[in-house]
Image (cartoon, rainbow, N blue to C red):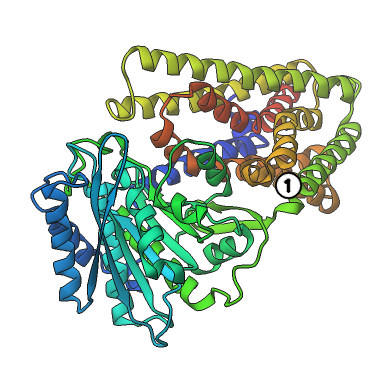
Amino acid sequence: MALFGRSNFISGVGRWLFCGVTVFLLSGTLGLALQRWPTQGRDPAGVGFDESRATADLRAFVGDGTPRVVGSAGAAQGRDRVVEVLSGLGLAVERRSARVERRAGAVDLENLVARIPGRVHGPARIAVVAHTDSVPGAPGASDDGAGVACALGVARSLLADPPLHDTLLVLTDGEERGLLGAQAFLAQDPAAAELRAVVNLDARGASGPAFVFETGPETAWLSSILARRVPAVRANSLMGVVYGAMPNGTDFTVFLRQGISGFNVAFVGDVGAYHTPDDTVERQSAATRAHMGMTAISLVRALDEELPEEGIPAGRAVFGDLAGVAMLRWPEEWTLTMAVGGVLALGACCAFGAFGAARPSHRAPGRAAGIVVAASVAVVALLACVGWGFGAAARTAGMTMATAPLRLQVLDAALFAAAVVAAIGIGAWLARCRVDPWSAMCGAWSPWAAVAVAAAWAVPAASFAFVVPIVAVAVAAVGASIAWRTGPADRLRPAAFMGAAAAGLVLLPLEPAFLDALGFQLGWLNGLRAGLLAVTLVPLATDAASAGSDTR
């Protein structure tokens, strides 16, 4: 294949492949940027959150960095500093003491509860929740000093522009010892009986966007709030499924068990600081605080204004954000129809294109598609094995996101780069095997089709990342087949590009968060993500290689 002149495929049909790879690069770069600057340059003051005041509140709360272990003098001093801030705002703070008997011994704790008056005085239906304690040896500036500072920021915002209804500020103790403070509040505090929804603020790291990673069961109504009312929203129904399968819990878990719905918000980034002496004010990201505060205020105001008197309507939805710019959502019961319909529409378009593009030099479309299916599955499986190998090597070398974050980030980037190179190589090999590009499209998307349909049938809420690309490539293929009046290859290129772009925009902005949360603990999963993303480039690579060979 010549590299210059009229046969230069990057200046011709290969431009679509080049643009697909570029979209991957830009999406990955955007994901990395959002880990550092999650508000995308937006002014958090636009929703009434003052980040500079939050920083001052955080410093006041953390003090000299003495750990605030439940029952300790450091914990009591930290609460005293919070009470001083709230009293300075003109709020009366109720100290709710409790003793919890455990097999390891009794635990004395103290929750702080403050009521922020609304324009219509009455029961407080909404609470903002964060915990004041930390683990032994950790200053707890992020977990959960940032949550406390953001809760204070919410209080400041609501005092400056009062909500419609009274709102509670609940700062629990003993979260790190087994969610003890939240349990004591619900069991003993009369204000708990008023609550209908909570916004819980927590952390697992020191930076990154504030993800709404868990909601109450009424996901249709709650995701509508996220889509309409939260700027730079980061949320995905898949996260709730994953978190629900884990043994972990937050204060939000306790409220959910009591039938109180709402939102669980936390950031996952720079996990090397999590539960360590490095969890300091200096390491805690100001951009993360701004995003959490902005998200919390938006959620509280939305709940205050829109929470139905008769209760949140039942109904479930599949939802997810696209790099914090927009949110897609649909009723959960549509998911299987969308996945199956997308697969059938894509298959029909591929068959139509393959038979229309067939030439004597090409293999029969059915056999060609079978070759591509085998090649695509092999690529995905191979990359999953490579990822597992990377993970095993990282564990042997003692590399974790806490000890060697940069090296693991480079390793992950290398895995994705290798996947793209493998996809281009597979495309060139398929062209030499006389596979037409439409058959390549059909076979390359077969792993996506299988995963999307399986997820839509078994766990619809976890299917967002797979169903969106399948529907996008199917719609693009149908549109191209109807609108494009030129040859089959010209119809393929925009459809294949749109499919690859949709996959990149859904998966890659989440990759830094996946890496921060899991590192290479499940290295095969890193490889699986890379492989699924890469095979979407196979049709474009096959088309470019076929066109290049035709010019020789």
Residue 477 appears in view: no
- Asked if 518 appears above or below 292 in the picture, the reply is above
What number of labels is visible? 1
In the image, taking residue 485 as reference, residue 115 lies left or right, namely left
Identify the residue under disc 1.
471
Find residue 439 and report its horizontal and vertical position in percent.
81, 28
Please identify the quadrant where the C terminus is shown. top right
Q: Residue at x 23, y 63 (%)?
A: 54
Disc 1 crowd rating (10 Å Cα; few below 14, some 14-19, many 20+) is many
Quadrant of the image occupied by residue 219:
bottom right
Q: Secondary structure at mark 1?
A: helix
Q: Quadrant of the N terminus?
A: top right
**Residue, x 81% and y 42% (percent of image)?**
340
475 w.r.t. 105: above or below: below
- Name the kind of residue labelled 1 in the image: Val
Residue 14 quadrant: top right
What residue do we see at 77% from left, 30% from top?
Answer: 437
Q: Quadrant of residue 148?
A: bottom left
Estimate the x, y position of residue 424 in percent, counting from the top left. 61, 24
**Vertical position of residue 358 compared to residue 302: above or below:** above
Q: In this view of the protein, can residue 47 be seen by the observer?
A: yes
Q: Residue furthest bottom?
A: 120
Q: Is residue 15 left or right of residue 39?
A: right
381 or 156, which lies in front? 156
Q: Nearer the viewer, residue 450 or 193?
A: 193
Q: Is residue 352 above or below residue 417?
A: below
> Residue 167: x, y in percent?
38, 74
x, y percent for residue 453: 75, 38
